[in-house]
């Protein structure tokens, strides 16, 4: 089996790592590329697990030695994908998933147009702010300046959504996980003729629904909320004065909703 290269991008805090971790628990044969970065570890992050943490000097040396498939500067730090990750996945015949920003994704698409690209959107700026804050809290510190910086960057990143083949809106976690899983299975089915048995019809439908070309109506409210479709091009962040207390209600961690099954995509043919 030839490994498929999946690229996933999203504004920081959209829930991309959460989605990817969930899908990795459920699907085999897909590797996650551990990027190199010059940013310091956050929370419980470990070297070699979430990232390979390194210095600017080391990163620049690796760059000069041509070790990166792609790289970019994001929020003042370098991030890059080592060519070795791709080579290893190819040797193992595994799919490879790259969690990279929009600049890196453009570099990979240019070099490997066959890559499958997926863009993850948060439902609206308020939910994004809540997720960024909650994550900061879980890491023991709420850095408002950093939260604001990432929020500001989000609209600019979202403007690149048209470059991606598939779009996920990470509103309800279960649903978004099921959609990401469906995309991987559908691409395996189309590219490798891999059987996906009785679930196939529903999986292919779910994946097709996530194709960017089929997502205009679904995306409209999200893009409007981020000021992307606003003809005046306004990019005001309308929620900045909101109190912190609202946060817990804005994004009742759909992941923690009691009856999450209702929201789950059901792949069973009926
Ligand atoms: P990213 O990797 O895109 O920067 P994370 O995966 O770290 O984002 O998620 C940011 C925060 O949002 C985390 O605290 C995570 O638990 C939470 N989160 C992710 N997806 C959802 C969701 N669908 N509903 C509620 N909270 C979510
Ligand atoms: P964070 O610091 O929140 O983990 O990541 C910040 C941004 O860097 C995210 O958009 C993430 O996708 C991106 N990123 C992580 N690894 C890489 C990489 O190897 N290359 C590129 N170009 N971006 C990356």
Image: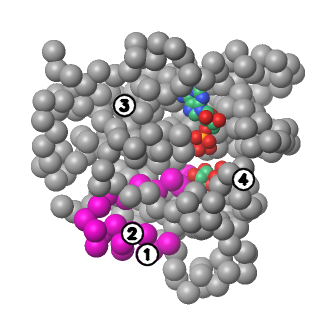
Residue of label 1: 84
Give the CA separation, mark 1 to mark 3: 29 Å
Pointers 3 and 2 in contact (CB under 8 A)? no
Residue of label 4: 42
Few, some or many C-alpha atoms within 10 Å of disc 4 (few <14, some 14-19, many ≥20)?
few
| Residue 233 to residue 196: above or below | above
In terms of depth relative to the viewer, which is nearer, 64 or 193? 193
Image quadrant of ligand 2? bottom right
Q: Is residue 19 left or right of residue 37?
A: left
Q: Is residue 116 left or right of residue 163?
A: left
Give the CA separation, mark 4 to mark 1: 25 Å
Residue in the picture at 80% in, 42% down: 140
Residue of label 2: 86
Look at the image and say whether residue 233 sits in the magenta stretch: no
Residue 127 image-quadrant placement: top right
Give the CA separation, mark 4 to mark 2: 25 Å
Pointers 1 and 3 in contact (CB under 8 A)? no
Residue 256 image-quadrant placement: top right
Query: Which mark sits nearer the N-terminus, 1 or 3?
Result: 1
Query: Which mark sits nearer the N-terminus, 4 or 2?
Result: 4
Image coords of residue 166 (percent x, y): 39, 39
Look at the image and say whether residue 100 sits in the magenta stretch: yes
Q: Mark 4 or mark 1: which is in front?
A: 4
Specify the quadrant that holds the N terminus. Answer: bottom left
Pointers 4 and 2 in contact (CB under 8 A)? no
In terms of depth relative to the viewer, which is nearer, 168 or 140? 140
Tell me the number on the disc at residue 178: 3
């Amino acid at each position: 089996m030839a490994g498929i290269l999946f690229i996933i991008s999203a504004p920081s805090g959209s829930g991309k790592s959460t989605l990817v971790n969930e899908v990795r628990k459920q699907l085999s044969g897909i590797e996650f590329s551990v990027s190199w970065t010059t940013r310091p570890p956050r929370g419980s992050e470990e070297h070699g697990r979430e990232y390979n943490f390194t210095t600017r000097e080391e990163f620049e040396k690796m760059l000069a030695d041509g070790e990166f498939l792609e790289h970019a500067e994001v929020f003042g730090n370098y991030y890059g994908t080592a060519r070795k990750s791709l080579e290893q996945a190819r040797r193992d015949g595994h799919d490879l998933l790259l969690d990279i920003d929009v600049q890196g994704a453009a570099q990979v698409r240019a070099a490997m147009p066959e890559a499958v690209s997926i863009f993850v959107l948060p439902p609206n700026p308020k939910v994004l702010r809540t997720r960024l804050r909650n994550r900061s809290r879980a890491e023991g510190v709420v850095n408002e300046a950093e939260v604001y910086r990432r929020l500001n960057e989000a609209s600019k990143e979202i403007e690149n959504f048209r470059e991606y083949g598939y779009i996920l809106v990470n509103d309800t976690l279960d649903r978004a996980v099921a959609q990401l899983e469906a995309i991987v299975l559908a691409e395996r089915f189309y590219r490798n003729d891999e059987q996906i048995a009785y679930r196939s019809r529903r999986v292919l439908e779910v994946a097709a629904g996530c194709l960017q070309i089929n997502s205009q109506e679904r995306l409209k409210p999200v893009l409007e909320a981020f000021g992307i479709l606003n003809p005046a091009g306004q990019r005001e962040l309308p929620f900045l004065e909101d109190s912190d207390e609202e946060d817990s209600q804005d994004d009742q961690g759909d992941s923690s909703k009691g009856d999450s099954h209702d929201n789950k995509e059901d792949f069973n043919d009926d």
